[in-house]
Amino acid sequence: MTAEIGIIGGSGLYSMPGFEQQEEATIDTPFGWPSDNYVLGTLAGRRVAFLPRHGRGHRISPSELNFRANIYGMKALGVERIISLSAVGSLKEEHRPLDFVIPDQFFDRTRGRVSTFFGEGLVAHISFADPVCPEMACVVENACRAAGVNVKQGGTYLCMEGPAFSTKAESHVYRSWGMDVIGMTNLQEAKLAREAEICYVTIAMVTDYDCWHPEHDAVTVNDIITNLMKNADNACKVVAAAVAGMPDKRECKCGSALAHANITDRKAIPEATKKKLELLIGKYLV
Protein backbone atom coordinates (compact mmCIF):
# COMPACT_ATOMS: atom_id res chain seq x y z
CA MET A 1 0.00 0.00 0.00
CA THR A 2 1.46 3.31 -1.09
CA ALA A 3 0.42 6.93 -1.59
CA GLU A 4 1.98 10.04 -3.11
CA ILE A 5 0.05 12.75 -1.27
CA GLY A 6 -0.70 12.81 2.45
CA ILE A 7 -3.57 14.67 4.11
CA ILE A 8 -3.56 15.36 7.83
CA GLY A 9 -7.03 16.27 9.09
CA GLY A 10 -7.29 18.61 12.04
CA SER A 11 -10.11 19.31 14.47
CA GLY A 12 -13.45 18.55 12.83
CA LEU A 13 -11.88 16.52 10.01
CA TYR A 14 -11.74 12.87 10.90
CA SER A 15 -12.48 11.48 7.43
CA MET A 16 -12.14 12.68 3.85
CA PRO A 17 -15.10 12.12 1.51
CA GLY A 18 -14.52 11.38 -2.14
CA PHE A 19 -11.96 8.62 -1.64
CA GLU A 20 -12.28 5.66 -3.97
CA GLN A 21 -10.97 2.15 -3.27
CA GLN A 22 -10.45 2.87 0.41
CA GLU A 23 -8.27 0.64 2.57
CA GLU A 24 -6.65 1.11 5.96
CA ALA A 25 -2.99 0.75 6.85
CA THR A 26 -1.73 0.16 10.37
CA ILE A 27 1.88 1.27 10.67
CA ASP A 28 4.14 0.66 13.66
CA THR A 29 7.08 3.07 13.45
CA PRO A 30 10.43 3.19 15.30
CA PHE A 31 8.89 6.13 17.17
CA GLY A 32 5.70 4.40 18.24
CA TRP A 33 2.16 4.41 16.90
CA PRO A 34 0.64 7.18 14.80
CA SER A 35 -2.60 8.88 15.83
CA ASP A 36 -4.74 6.36 13.95
CA ASN A 37 -4.74 4.04 10.95
CA TYR A 38 -3.99 5.70 7.62
CA VAL A 39 -6.87 5.61 5.16
CA LEU A 40 -5.56 5.09 1.64
CA GLY A 41 -7.42 5.54 -1.59
CA THR A 42 -7.70 7.45 -4.82
CA LEU A 43 -8.77 11.09 -4.88
CA ALA A 44 -8.92 13.08 -8.12
CA GLY A 45 -6.98 10.29 -9.77
CA ARG A 46 -4.07 10.41 -7.27
CA ARG A 47 -3.04 7.99 -4.55
CA VAL A 48 -3.71 9.67 -1.21
CA ALA A 49 -3.22 8.77 2.46
CA PHE A 50 -5.44 10.43 5.07
CA LEU A 51 -4.64 10.61 8.79
CA PRO A 52 -6.89 12.20 11.44
CA ARG A 53 -4.35 14.09 13.56
CA HIS A 54 -6.22 13.70 16.84
CA GLY A 55 -7.52 10.21 16.06
CA ARG A 56 -11.07 9.34 15.17
CA GLY A 57 -13.29 10.63 17.95
CA HIS A 58 -10.75 13.38 18.74
CA ARG A 59 -9.12 11.54 21.62
CA ILE A 60 -5.53 12.86 21.49
CA SER A 61 -4.59 16.27 22.92
CA PRO A 62 -2.17 18.52 20.96
CA SER A 63 0.51 18.00 23.62
CA GLU A 64 0.08 14.22 23.46
CA LEU A 65 0.44 13.85 19.70
CA ASN A 66 3.18 11.55 18.43
CA PHE A 67 4.29 13.87 15.64
CA ARG A 68 7.28 11.73 14.71
CA ALA A 69 5.21 8.61 14.23
CA ASN A 70 2.61 10.51 12.17
CA ILE A 71 5.17 11.91 9.71
CA TYR A 72 7.32 8.77 9.65
CA GLY A 73 4.22 6.75 8.75
CA MET A 74 3.57 9.06 5.80
CA LYS A 75 7.17 8.60 4.65
CA ALA A 76 6.84 4.82 4.97
CA LEU A 77 3.83 4.93 2.65
CA GLY A 78 5.86 6.77 0.00
CA VAL A 79 4.21 10.16 0.54
CA GLU A 80 6.13 13.07 -1.02
CA ARG A 81 3.70 15.90 -0.22
CA ILE A 82 1.55 16.64 2.83
CA ILE A 83 -1.46 18.94 2.99
CA SER A 84 -2.14 19.68 6.65
CA LEU A 85 -5.47 21.12 7.78
CA SER A 86 -5.60 22.97 11.06
CA ALA A 87 -8.25 24.90 12.99
CA VAL A 88 -6.81 28.23 14.15
CA GLY A 89 -7.71 31.44 15.91
CA SER A 90 -7.21 34.74 14.12
CA LEU A 91 -4.86 37.40 15.51
CA LYS A 92 -5.73 39.99 12.87
CA GLU A 93 -9.03 41.61 11.97
CA GLU A 94 -8.46 40.80 8.31
CA HIS A 95 -8.53 37.04 8.93
CA ARG A 96 -12.19 36.45 9.59
CA PRO A 97 -13.86 33.29 10.89
CA LEU A 98 -14.36 30.83 8.00
CA ASP A 99 -11.41 32.35 6.06
CA PHE A 100 -8.48 30.11 5.13
CA VAL A 101 -4.87 31.25 5.60
CA ILE A 102 -1.83 29.57 4.03
CA PRO A 103 1.00 30.63 6.34
CA ASP A 104 4.57 30.75 5.08
CA GLN A 105 6.17 31.09 8.53
CA PHE A 106 5.90 29.51 11.98
CA PHE A 107 6.73 30.77 15.47
CA ASP A 108 7.21 28.21 18.23
CA ARG A 109 5.67 28.77 21.66
CA THR A 110 5.48 25.11 22.67
CA ARG A 111 7.44 23.61 25.55
CA GLY A 112 9.41 20.40 25.45
CA ARG A 113 7.86 18.79 22.37
CA VAL A 114 10.11 16.53 20.32
CA SER A 115 10.38 17.93 16.82
CA THR A 116 13.28 16.02 15.27
CA PHE A 117 13.99 12.47 14.17
CA PHE A 118 17.68 12.90 14.90
CA GLY A 119 19.80 12.30 17.95
CA GLU A 120 21.15 9.07 19.45
CA GLY A 121 24.53 9.60 17.80
CA LEU A 122 23.43 11.30 14.60
CA VAL A 123 23.25 15.09 14.36
CA ALA A 124 21.55 16.81 11.42
CA HIS A 125 20.67 20.47 10.94
CA ILE A 126 18.06 21.16 8.27
CA SER A 127 17.43 24.55 6.71
CA PHE A 128 14.10 25.85 8.02
CA ALA A 129 14.17 29.51 7.06
CA ASP A 130 11.27 28.89 4.68
CA PRO A 131 9.28 26.11 6.37
CA VAL A 132 6.47 25.78 3.81
CA CYS A 133 6.83 24.37 0.31
CA PRO A 134 6.23 27.34 -2.04
CA GLU A 135 5.08 25.08 -4.86
CA MET A 136 2.37 23.54 -2.70
CA ALA A 137 1.31 26.89 -1.25
CA CYS A 138 0.51 28.17 -4.73
CA VAL A 139 -1.42 25.02 -5.61
CA VAL A 140 -3.50 25.25 -2.43
CA GLU A 141 -4.19 28.95 -2.90
CA ASN A 142 -5.50 28.26 -6.41
CA ALA A 143 -7.61 25.40 -5.04
CA CYS A 144 -9.16 27.72 -2.41
CA ARG A 145 -10.08 30.28 -5.04
CA ALA A 146 -11.54 27.58 -7.30
CA ALA A 147 -13.66 26.38 -4.36
CA GLY A 148 -14.88 29.91 -3.62
CA VAL A 149 -13.12 30.11 -0.25
CA ASN A 150 -11.72 33.43 0.95
CA VAL A 151 -7.97 32.82 1.27
CA LYS A 152 -4.74 34.64 2.01
CA GLN A 153 -1.33 33.20 1.17
CA GLY A 154 1.41 34.25 3.57
CA GLY A 155 1.57 35.12 7.25
CA THR A 156 2.84 33.56 10.47
CA TYR A 157 1.28 30.66 12.37
CA LEU A 158 2.09 30.88 16.08
CA CYS A 159 2.15 27.39 17.58
CA MET A 160 1.18 27.42 21.26
CA GLU A 161 1.25 24.57 23.74
CA GLY A 162 -2.39 24.34 24.79
CA PRO A 163 -4.70 22.66 25.45
CA ALA A 164 -6.10 25.79 27.15
CA PHE A 165 -6.64 28.80 24.89
CA SER A 166 -4.64 32.02 25.33
CA THR A 167 -5.04 34.59 28.05
CA LYS A 168 -5.91 38.09 26.85
CA ALA A 169 -2.41 39.24 27.79
CA GLU A 170 -0.84 36.51 25.65
CA SER A 171 -3.17 37.19 22.75
CA HIS A 172 -2.34 40.91 22.76
CA VAL A 173 1.40 40.16 22.90
CA TYR A 174 1.14 37.83 19.91
CA ARG A 175 -0.72 40.54 18.01
CA SER A 176 1.99 43.06 18.87
CA TRP A 177 4.53 40.64 17.36
CA GLY A 178 2.63 40.65 14.08
CA MET A 179 1.45 37.04 14.25
CA ASP A 180 -1.45 36.14 11.94
CA VAL A 181 -3.05 32.98 13.31
CA ILE A 182 -2.64 30.77 16.37
CA GLY A 183 -2.87 26.99 16.62
CA MET A 184 -1.47 24.08 18.60
CA THR A 185 -0.03 21.53 16.17
CA ASN A 186 1.60 22.50 12.89
CA LEU A 187 5.10 23.66 13.80
CA GLN A 188 6.29 20.17 14.75
CA GLU A 189 4.71 18.63 11.65
CA ALA A 190 6.46 21.14 9.41
CA LYS A 191 9.89 20.50 10.95
CA LEU A 192 9.55 16.74 10.78
CA ALA A 193 8.22 16.82 7.23
CA ARG A 194 11.29 18.83 6.19
CA GLU A 195 13.58 16.29 7.88
CA ALA A 196 11.71 13.53 6.06
CA GLU A 197 12.16 15.46 2.78
CA ILE A 198 8.40 15.72 2.34
CA CYS A 199 6.84 18.90 0.93
CA TYR A 200 4.51 20.47 3.50
CA VAL A 201 1.79 23.11 3.49
CA THR A 202 -0.72 24.19 6.14
CA ILE A 203 -4.30 25.19 5.43
CA ALA A 204 -5.14 27.21 8.53
CA MET A 205 -8.92 27.36 8.87
CA VAL A 206 -10.03 30.30 10.99
CA THR A 207 -12.71 29.47 13.56
CA ASP A 208 -12.59 32.53 15.83
CA TYR A 209 -10.80 35.77 16.76
CA ASP A 210 -9.04 34.26 19.77
CA CYS A 211 -9.79 36.34 22.89
CA TRP A 212 -8.31 39.71 21.89
CA HIS A 213 -11.29 40.89 19.86
CA PRO A 214 -13.75 43.07 21.84
CA GLU A 215 -16.70 41.18 20.37
CA HIS A 216 -15.10 37.75 20.89
CA ASP A 217 -13.59 38.06 24.35
CA ALA A 218 -14.31 34.50 25.44
CA VAL A 219 -13.50 31.65 23.06
CA THR A 220 -15.72 28.63 23.75
CA VAL A 221 -15.52 25.13 22.33
CA ASN A 222 -19.16 25.37 21.17
CA ASP A 223 -18.42 28.47 19.09
CA ILE A 224 -15.39 26.83 17.55
CA ILE A 225 -17.19 23.57 16.77
CA THR A 226 -19.92 25.46 14.90
CA ASN A 227 -17.33 27.03 12.61
CA LEU A 228 -15.37 23.78 12.39
CA MET A 229 -18.35 22.09 10.81
CA LYS A 230 -18.77 24.94 8.33
CA ASN A 231 -15.06 24.83 7.49
CA ALA A 232 -15.07 21.06 7.02
CA ASP A 233 -17.17 21.17 3.84
CA ASN A 234 -14.94 23.85 2.33
CA ALA A 235 -11.82 21.96 3.37
CA CYS A 236 -12.90 18.83 1.52
CA LYS A 237 -13.55 20.85 -1.65
CA VAL A 238 -10.18 22.58 -1.38
CA VAL A 239 -8.27 19.37 -0.76
CA ALA A 240 -9.87 17.66 -3.77
CA ALA A 241 -9.01 20.62 -5.98
CA ALA A 242 -5.47 20.82 -4.60
CA VAL A 243 -4.83 17.11 -5.16
CA ALA A 244 -6.14 17.39 -8.71
CA GLY A 245 -3.92 20.40 -9.39
CA MET A 246 -0.73 19.04 -7.87
CA PRO A 247 2.14 18.78 -10.42
CA ASP A 248 3.35 15.26 -11.17
CA LYS A 249 6.97 16.11 -10.36
CA ARG A 250 8.41 18.19 -7.56
CA GLU A 251 10.47 21.19 -8.67
CA CYS A 252 11.18 22.47 -5.14
CA LYS A 253 14.13 21.78 -2.83
CA CYS A 254 12.15 19.89 -0.18
CA GLY A 255 13.15 16.49 -1.57
CA SER A 256 16.86 17.09 -0.88
CA ALA A 257 16.61 18.78 2.53
CA LEU A 258 19.02 16.30 4.14
CA ALA A 259 21.64 16.39 1.39
CA HIS A 260 23.92 18.70 3.40
CA ALA A 261 22.30 18.46 6.84
CA ASN A 262 24.23 15.57 8.40
CA ILE A 263 27.19 16.83 10.44
CA THR A 264 28.16 13.53 12.07
CA ASP A 265 31.10 11.47 10.78
CA ARG A 266 29.56 8.45 9.09
CA LYS A 267 31.93 6.12 10.92
CA ALA A 268 30.72 7.50 14.24
CA ILE A 269 27.01 6.88 13.65
CA PRO A 270 25.82 3.95 15.81
CA GLU A 271 24.50 1.00 13.82
CA ALA A 272 21.24 1.04 15.79
CA THR A 273 20.65 4.66 14.77
CA LYS A 274 21.48 3.91 11.14
CA LYS A 275 18.91 1.13 11.18
CA LYS A 276 16.30 3.26 12.95
CA LEU A 277 16.66 6.10 10.43
CA GLU A 278 17.34 4.06 7.30
CA LEU A 279 14.12 5.24 5.69
CA LEU A 280 15.22 8.86 6.05
CA ILE A 281 18.99 8.82 5.55
CA GLY A 282 19.74 5.54 3.83
CA LYS A 283 20.37 7.11 0.43
CA TYR A 284 23.00 9.42 1.92
CA LEU A 285 24.95 6.64 3.65
CA VAL A 286 25.52 4.44 0.60
Image: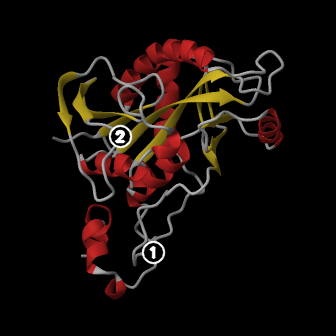
Expressed as whole percent of the image width and height from the top left, the position of residue 10 reads: 46, 30
Q: Which residue is drawn at 27% across and 75% down?
A: 272
Badge 1 crowding class, 10 Å Cα cut-off, few under 14, some 14 to 19, many 20 or more, is: some
In this view, the mark in front (2 or 1)? 2
Secondary structure under the numbered disc 1 in the rendered image = loop
Residue 237 visible in the shown view:
yes
Give the residue pinned by disc 1. Answer: 123
**Amino acid type for the residue under numbered disc 1:** Val
Q: How is the image coloured?
A: secondary structure
Point out residue 188 in the picture as x, y percentages from the top left corner: 51, 50
Rendered view: 231 above or below 7:
above
Relative to residue 235, is residue 267 depicted above or below? below
Towards the viewer: 3 or 172 = 172
Location of residue 274 with respect to 127 vertically, above or below: below
Residue 147 at least partly seen: no
* Quadrant in which the C terminus is drawn: bottom left
Q: Residue reaching furthest bottom? A: 267
Dividing the image into 4 quarters, which one contains the N terminus?
top left
Q: Along the line of sight, which residue is nearer the eye, 152 or 282?
A: 282
Q: Residue at x 46, y 17 (%)?
A: 232
In the rendered image, which residue does mark 2 sit on?
35
Q: Which type of secondary structure does the marked residue at label 2 adopt?
A: loop
Mark number displayed over residue 235:
none
Disc 2 + disc 1, Cβ < 8 Å: no
